Amino acid sequence: MTQIRKIIHVDMDAFYAAIEQRDDPSLQGKAVIVGGDPNSRGVVATCSYEAREFGVHSAMSASKARKRCPHGIFVKPRFDVYKSVSNLIRDVFHEHSDLVEPLSLDEAFLDVTENKRGIPTATAVAKTIKNEIRRKTGLTASAGVSFNKFLAKVASDMDKPDGLTVVPPWKAGEFVDSLPVEKFFGVGQVTARKMRMFGIRTGADLKRLDRLQLIELFGKTGNYFYEISQGIDRRPVRPERVRKSIGKEITLDRDVDDFGEIHAVLVDLSEQLEDALIRHDAKGRTLTLKVKYFDFQQITRSVTLPALVERRAEILHHALVLLKKTDATRKKIRLLGVTLSNLDLPSDADYYQPEFDF
Ligand code: DCP
Ligand code: MG
């Protein structure tokens, strides 16, 4: 069975404004508006939560922001500082997973189905990340934890600032049902108006329509709305660095030369590799078997196949063929590894593309 993924979305609170307040104590507790000289035609990049109470928000014209919040303190952005803080939080993410997909300077998805420190739950990973961010930057972040990107992203926004919202599989239905459609990030004003016309206000309303009805109403995005309303989002977390290979290896408890035992290890490895391929949504053409003998001598045997490989049975089959080209069963083995390279990774275009930024 495919493993359920554990996804975290982390988003810093009032990012630019929080940094300005951190670095200038006289701004703490005040309505701080970053970007946009109110005397010219600039726009607001972001503002502190104190300013949000007056209706100021990102992308608003600076002059409007000043009208809404006359006591607001306008601050010029310092992008180099934001960038260096962004690097610090990315370092924190990478301490927990290699599967980190930054969306902007202040937010990222992490796939922590396997996390580097072996922390038992995704919720505990998220708490640790929030603490480490606070310790290293003096800033707060909000996190959402769930089993797909959509739910994690919406969850991170539920309890800002300094929030942590977890949507486990058994709560997803209820969570999506109660969600106003505006929270289905990407439902812009035009779509929202159209939805209202059809009486669609929440996830539950959306769920009453089937896939075809939604496609008829919203085109390609209808498909996305359908899946989201069912709590389904298959998009993998896609790290920036393009992966060249995906592999798994096991060091044995003791050196073995028994075929039955070696076979059992390869079964295990094939399964682990299949899980990893599913997580990365990857297939590959070249399979490599790595064998380390008891004397630490290490060899690899590879085969490049005419078709893409993705399933555990195929992986196991080819690994066993490669095993015959080694001295396994004649010489004791201490480590076995299976790696797939020559990968076929999906491009963004392979996912139905909602009409908005994700
Ligand atoms: N930003 C910008 N222009 C926008 C939106 C955002 O320059 N239209 C910048 C300023 C933000 C940063 O990107 O600080 C992160 O954007 P967010 O949407 O995450 O907003 P904040 O982090 O400021 O606030 P929140 O606590 O709502 O996440
Ligand atoms: Mg933010």
Image (cartoon, rainbow, N blue to C red):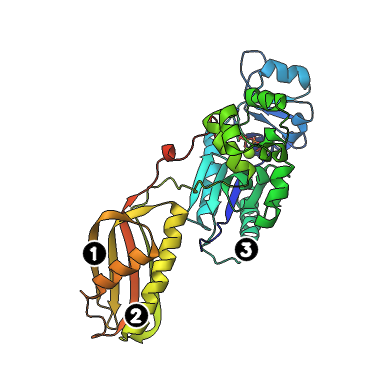
Q: Nearer the viewer, residue 162 or 120?
A: 120
Residue 247, relative to residue 261: is it above or below?
Answer: above
Number of residue marks: 3
Q: Nearer the viewer, residue 293 or 214?
A: 214
Q: Amino acid at mark 3?
A: Thr
Residue under the image location 49 percent in, 37 percent down: 352
Residue under the image location 43 percent in, 45 percent down: 240
Q: Quadrant of the C terminus?
A: top right
Q: CA distance from mark 3 to mark 1?
A: 36 Å
Secondary structure under tag 2 reads helix
Q: Earlier in the sequence, mark 3 or mark 1?
A: 3
> In the rendering, which numbered label is found on residue 121?
3
Residue 119 at x, y percent in the picture: 59, 65
Q: Quadrant of residue 313?
A: bottom left
Residue 42, relative to residue 353: is it above or below?
Answer: above
Q: Amino acid at mark 1?
A: Ser
Q: Amino acid at mark 2?
A: Ile
Q: Residues within 10 Å of mark 1 (few under 14, many from 20)?
A: some
Q: Is mark 2 within 8 Å of ligand 2?
A: no
Secondary structure under tag 1 reads strand
Q: Is mark 1 within 8 Å of ligand 1?
A: no
Q: CA distance from mark 2 to mark 1?
A: 18 Å
Can I make out residue 54 in this image? yes
Residue under the image location 71 percent in, 17 percent down: 64
Of the residues tagged 3 and 1, which is closer to the observer?
1
Q: Residues within 10 Å of mark 3 (few under 14, many from 20)?
A: few
Q: Nearer the viewer, residue 241 or 208?
A: 208
Q: Check disc 2 and report the residue beneath it.
A: 262
Q: Check disc 1 and report the residue beneath it.
A: 302
